[in-house]
Amino acid sequence: MIDFAENETYVRTVRRHWIFFAAEVAFFIFTALIPLGLYLFFGNDVVPLIVKSSIIAGNLNGFLLFCYSIYLLFIWFGVWLEWTDFHLDIWVLTNQRIIDIEQNGLFNRKISEYRLDMIQDVTVVIPSFIATIFHFGNISIHTASDRSKFDFSRIANPEKVRDDIMSFHHSALDNPRDVNISNSTVKQPFV
């Protein structure tokens, strides 16, 4: 759960573009169909060899179906992991900061925050013709903090996200805001 400051409001959530998740799913579907294709093309030649060598007694087709089902279970687990990574890797933009939530695996999450008034430069890169057609790209943000640069990679509509960031960056610079220092609130203008 994200805790917002007293005067902080939610603006938008940014994720990777859906096309990258779709590409991963297409890869898993292709991977799931490989054993089925091998069985259909080479099954008539391989099955008699396995039966002759008597490695497996009984119903060979049942055993192969069982092995394929286990294989599909691992494929499904891979799709689920990709969906979890896609769904939980987010950037939350508020009127005061950017919150970067990066999910690594199932139980490892890194959360970073960047104040909008500390931003020095925002760069949008549209890397290819395909990126132009599907409206995705990368945003690189330079800040005055100890981690001076961070990236939003492969996000949808990067120009709109950049415009939102810069709009709230300028309003953070123009308007003083309350800064909480050691449980005391101090009015501090940003110049």
Image: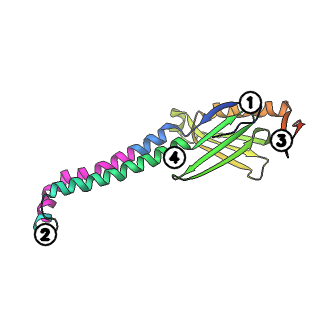
Residue ID for mark 3: 180
Is 63 left, or right, of 78 in this rendering? Answer: left
Q: Secondary structure at mark 2?
A: helix
Image spot of residue 18 (x, y percent): 49, 37
Q: Nearer the viewer, mark 2 or mark 1?
A: 2
Q: Secondary structure at mark 4?
A: helix
- C-alpha span from label 2 to label 3: 76 Å
Among the two numbered marks 4 and 2 on one chain, the one whose residue lies closer to the N terminus: 2
Residue ID for mark 1: 167
- C-alpha span from label 3 to label 4: 33 Å
What's the mark number on residue 53?
A: 2
Q: What residue lies at 39% left-to-right and 47% top-to-bottom?
A: 27
Q: Which residues are magenta?
A: 26-49
Residue ID for mark 4: 85
Image spot of residue 125 (x, y percent): 62, 41
Image spot of residue 166 (x, y percent): 73, 33
Among the two numbered marks 2 and 3 on one chain, the one whose residue lies closer to the N terminus: 2
Among the two numbered marks 3 and 4 on one chain, the one whose residue lies closer to the N terminus: 4
